Each structure stands twice: as C-alpha cells, then as structure tokens.
Image (cartoon, rainbow, N blue to C red):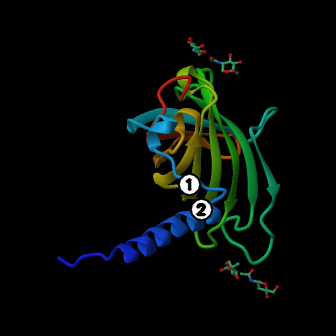
Amino acid sequence: MTQIHPKHMYIILAIFLFSLFIEGESNEFATSLPPKSLHLKNEKLTHLHFYWHEIINGDHPTKVTVVKAPPSNTTNFFGAITVLDDALRVGPEENSTIVGRAQGMYAASDNTTYSISMDLSLKFTEGIYNGSTLSIMGRNQISLPMEVPIVGGTGVFRFARGYTHIKTYKHVPEVFAIIDMNLYVYHYGDSEKY
Ligand SMILES: *[C@@H]1O[C@H](CO)[C@@H](O)[C@H](O)[C@H]1NC(C)=O
Ligand SMILES: *[C@@H]1O[C@H](CO)[C@@H](O)[C@H](O)[C@H]1NC(C)=O
Ligand SMILES: *[C@@H]1O[C@H](CO)[C@@H](O)[C@H](O)[C@H]1NC(C)=O
Ligand SMILES: CC(=O)N[C@H]1CO[C@H](CO)[C@@H](O)[C@@H]1O
C-alpha cells in the first residue's frame, strides 16, 4: 500500500471541491432527481382497445385536407396534408361511447404507395384517463395492418412508450373510415394525481 502524503491529501480535496464548484456552475438549469420524487415507482404495461372514427364527407367531416397533392409528377397523393379531430369510441358503432379524440395531422409521404406520416395526440376523456394524452408518431401504410410507435404522453401516461396496432375495420371510400386500435403502453401513473 502506498501512503498518501498529507500534503497530497489537501491537493486531492481541493480538486474535489473545485470539481463540485464546476459541476454546480455548468448545470445551473439541470438538477438530477431521484425518480421517486416524481412518484415513478411502478412502471406498468396497459393495453387499450378502441375504434378511431374518421368521417370523411357529409355535414360534419372530422378531417380536412389543408394541402392537396400537387397535380403533376406525384403518385399516391404524395404531398397532401390533412388535419383531423376524430372521435375514439369503445366500439365500431357510430353511437358507442366516446373515450377520447385523435387530434393532429398526417401527410402523404410515400411516392410509391399510399402511406402517411402521422403526428397524433390521443386526448382521453374517460375515467382516470380523462385529461391525459398519448403522442403517436410514425408511418402508417393505410391498406395494411400497421404498427406505429407511441413516443410519449402526459398525465397518467407521463414517460409513455410503446406501440399501437392499427387496422382498418370498415372503410367506405370518401364517406368514413373506422379503424381498430390496440395500444400497448408502458407508463407510471395510475390515479387522478398521476
Ligand atoms: C413521384 O413519382 C412520379 C411518378 O413515378 C415521379 O415522376 C416523381 O418525380 C416522383 N416525385 C418525387 C418527389 O419523388
Ligand atoms: C346505438 O344504436 C343502436 C341502433 O340504432 C341501438 O340499438 C343501441 O342501443 C345504441 N347504443 C347506444 C350506446 O346508444
Ligand atoms: C373530464 O374532465 C373535465 C375537465 O376536468 C370535466 O369537465 C369532465 O366532466 C370530465 N369527464 C369525465 C367523463 O369525467
Ligand atoms: C409521370 C409524370 O407525370 N411526369 C411528368 C413530370 O413533369 C414533367 C415536366 O413538367 C413532364 O414532362 C412529365 O411527363
């Protein structure tokens, strides 16, 4: 064992204190927290199942195409942008209970097949989920069953991550589309207090 000379001890202590000072200075805006301080104790996995109802035409369409695909040199509506505020219902029937809404936008972003890039907030209005949201972002090739990432959330769904299976349940072109959604999401919150 090598002995540390007392003089060296002072130097080591000085370097240690200086490093604390540097860290404090450079991280004025960022503080490391124990996860418990945000009640992040039990991460849980929740399965949600509901139907996404999009009314395309009629008196009360729930989506609007704000940018049409340029008429030339495009295929599969490439370039079209749509904004939506669609109901999420427990069942495929048009009068079944609303559990939330899908709000956001999508752009036709594949020039060889009809596929959209989605940026959706699912805003829930039922039970303990009332007021919480999930953010969904990713590619959706509408004609096929798809998997789209869940990239985050708020409220009960803070720190959310997961994926959603999306498949068309019923589609009447130019009239409406009902999409079956199964979501698998890791998150922490479980009460009104999150
Ligand atoms: C889309 O596809 C069409 C037809 O193949 C082609 O003419 C056009 O250049 C493509 N557009 C883009 C942006 O790649
Ligand atoms: C929905 O409508 C159908 C037939 O129109 C009816 O039998 C059913 O009870 C209604 N469901 C709800 C939840 O209102
Ligand atoms: C959801 O929360 C809003 C705002 O706090 C409230 O007005 C509404 O009644 C709640 N809905 C349900 C179904 O609890
Ligand atoms: C596939 C297609 O529509 N191609 C057209 C793209 O635009 C150029 C120039 O405007 C035309 O010459 C092509 O026929």
Mark 1, residue position:
142
The one nearer the camera, 61 or 4, is 4
Q: In which quarter of the image is residue 118?
A: bottom right
Q: Do the residues labelled 2 and 1 touch (CB within 8 Å)?
A: yes
The one nearer the camera, 157 or 116, is 157
| CA separation in Å, label 2 and label 1 | 6 Å
Q: Position of residue 164 (x, y in %)?
A: 47, 46
Residue shown at 38% from the left, 38% from the top: 45
Ligand 4 found in image quarter: bottom right
Q: Position of residue 191 (x, y in %)?
A: 50, 24
The one nearer the camera, 76 or 103, is 103
Question: How crowded is the residue under tag 2: few (<14 C-alpha within 10 Å), some, or many (20+)?
Answer: many
Residue shown at 65% from the left, 46% from the top: 173
Residue shown at 53% from the left, 29% from the top: 194
Whether residue 184 sits left or right of residue 23 in the image: it is: left
The kind of residue tagged 2 is Ser
Q: Quadrant of residue 46?
A: top left
Mark 2, residue position:
115
